[in-house]
Amino acid sequence: MKLAEDLYPLPVKLHKIKKKAAITAIFRLMVFILLLGFLILGLSENKLYLLAVPVWGIIFIGLIKVFNQLKDLEAFILEVQDMEVEEKKRQARELGSFDPGEEFLDKGHPFCNDLDLFGQHSLFQLINHTVSKTGRKLLAQNLKKQMDPEMAKIQFASVEELKNKTELIRNFEAVGRAFLKKEKDKGQFYSWLQQPESWHKAYFILMIIGPLGGMGIILASLMGLVASGWLGLWILLGTVFLSLVFKDLKKASGIWPNDGDIKTFRIWSQLLEKEKFDESGLKHIHHHFEDGQFSKGLRSLEQISLLVQNRMNFVYLIFNLLFWLDFFVLWQLNRWKNSYGTDLSEMEKIFDHWQVLVSLSAFSREMQLEGQVLWTENDLIRCKSIQHPLLKPSLAVGNDFFLDEKIKTVLLTGSNMSGKTTFMRTLGINLVMVNLGLRPMAAKMEVGNFSLYTSMRNTDNLGESVSSFYAELSRIRKILEAVEKKETVFYLMDEILKGTNTRDRIQGSEALIRQLAKGNARGIISTHDIELSELEKTLPYLTNYSFHSEIHENEIQFDYKLKEGSCPSFNAHKLMELMGIKFE
């Protein structure tokens, strides 16, 4: 399939292609009827009619090829249309119809479950533009990676260059979406590629005798030189010889990749061969396509695939019995295996990497990310106007935040629903974004080399007889273990020790703050215990931040702006009144 350069307007282009496909389908049916008619007449009336069978057969195959190309182009354009609709949904944060990637949730992971990386209304839904199972899995692994500044810098440079190639990004995704709909596991196929070839030298003789003998018998029969019974004897003899390679070809056809997989890889190769990149990271993974060998090998594989997967086709069966085509197919198959087979499994891994980069680049372009990111050797985090990527842009409130090397603990207090948890998740999810090589959803973000840990969304588990309080302690234990291993930790803890009584909670929180400060750990702890804010007076490494609310008559108003100092007032009393609880 050759991608059309003049796609727009999409509805007009789509209408033209559908019309051409319908006309081609009608001609194809007419040719098939003629082919069948000449075959019947040749076998029953006059053998001269059989001379027209190969001609009409070639025309029929040509029309099949044209029709398939038109249907492929139609499928491609339909996917481009759907992608444009999905882009608007992502920009409006309407993510319900997107793949949530829930199987990638991991309660034992240092941060993924707490930061809405997967599940409904998640970062995965916002970012994911992959089209294969393995590409999707690789993107999820990237989302869950611990902070790695060096890799993030490399990926950042790749995304920055790639996101400007809008046509490549669009075509790469649309091709995969159009043709990888019935993706098939290729493990057995890759194993088969490593096995010794099943071609024997004696098959060369049969591969040559088949077409020559078949054509000779047909011509001799038509000219009356031999009885027509010899043609039947030739077919019977061919059946015996064809049985020699039947098992090998049957095995190959059973493990053969889907047509859509091969077609996608071939078109992807052609797309990438046309591109040139300046950034070293992209050059490193692009050099595979510079000599055109990938697309050449895949084009050859696609042609062989047409024969392998259509061996039970009526037209092929006739030609196979007459000319012993299976020997030619097996020869082509082993020839291809020797020339390109060792590269194919590695090729899929390379394409997975490209899918991840295309996803990140498409996301960056759709979200119009322009924020600056600076990785520093200092143990600090500085953010200017940072926002949560999963909130609608019209509702998101930007906040400034600075955690320098002198501060170990930020104690975050505030009213219910004032934005404490959302702000902590905002920091965490933006850290994941910059670790992916993306710009942050902020004007600027400066980040040290931290390991990220969270303790926020802790719930009980009846199946494991685990209470929410024990679940939280388990999360805290993992943070402490990381600190004990001398990791440089940045932590986010929401409503610390909320599962116990006030006295134990305050004492336990203070003990935890002091213990964490002894190691190379810093982070944010949110709490409703305003008493803990007094620690700022005695602990030089602790500072207070807060979110406020104002009560006007029967309405609580929030500005969702982060402020220095502890929260001066809380709204729980008023919220309970509004919910119907009466205080005497």
Image (cartoon, grey):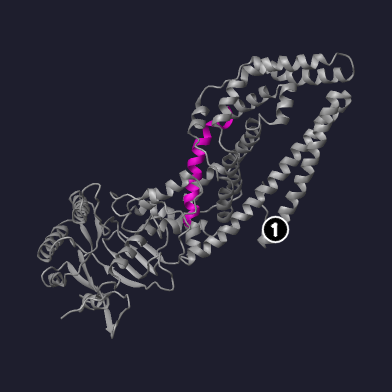
**Above or below, comparing residue 514 to residue 201 in the picture:** below
Tell me where residue 340 sits by quadrant: top right
Query: Residue visible at 36% across and 65% down?
Result: 445
- Between 516 and 280, the residue placed more toward the observer is 516
Q: Position of residue 10 (x, y in %)?
A: 66, 60
Q: Position of residue 429 (x, y in %)?
A: 35, 60
- Between 31 and 282, the residue placed more toward the observer is 31
Question: How dense is the environment of label 1, judged by Cα within 10 Å: few (below 14), some, or many (20 and up)?
Answer: some
**Above or below, comparing residue 84 to residue 578 in the picture:** above
Apparent side of residue 236 relative to residue 391 in the rendered image (left or right):
right
Specify the farthest residue to the bottom.
Answer: 553
Which residue is labeled 1 in the image?
13
Q: Which residues are magenta?
A: 338-360
Tell me where residue 233 sits by quadrant: top right
| Magenta span contains residue 313 | no
- SS at mark 1 in the image: helix
Can you say which quadrant of the picture contains the C terminus?
bottom left
Query: Residue visible at 40% across and 50% down?
Result: 140
Judge whether residue 188 can be spotted in this image: yes
Q: Position of residue 413 (x, y in %)?
A: 22, 71
User: The residue under label 1 is which amino acid type?
Assistant: Lys
| Magenta span contains residue 351 | yes
Query: Residue visible at 13% across and 58% down?
Result: 515
Q: Position of residue 129 (x, y in %)?
A: 49, 54
- Between 207 and 447, the residue placed more toward the observer is 207
Apparent side of residue 243 relative to residue 554 in the rendered image (left or right):
right
Judge whether residue 276 can be spotted in this image: no
**Image mark count:** 1
Tell me where residue 539 sits by quadrant: bottom left
- Tell me which secondary structure the magenta stretch mostly adopts: helix
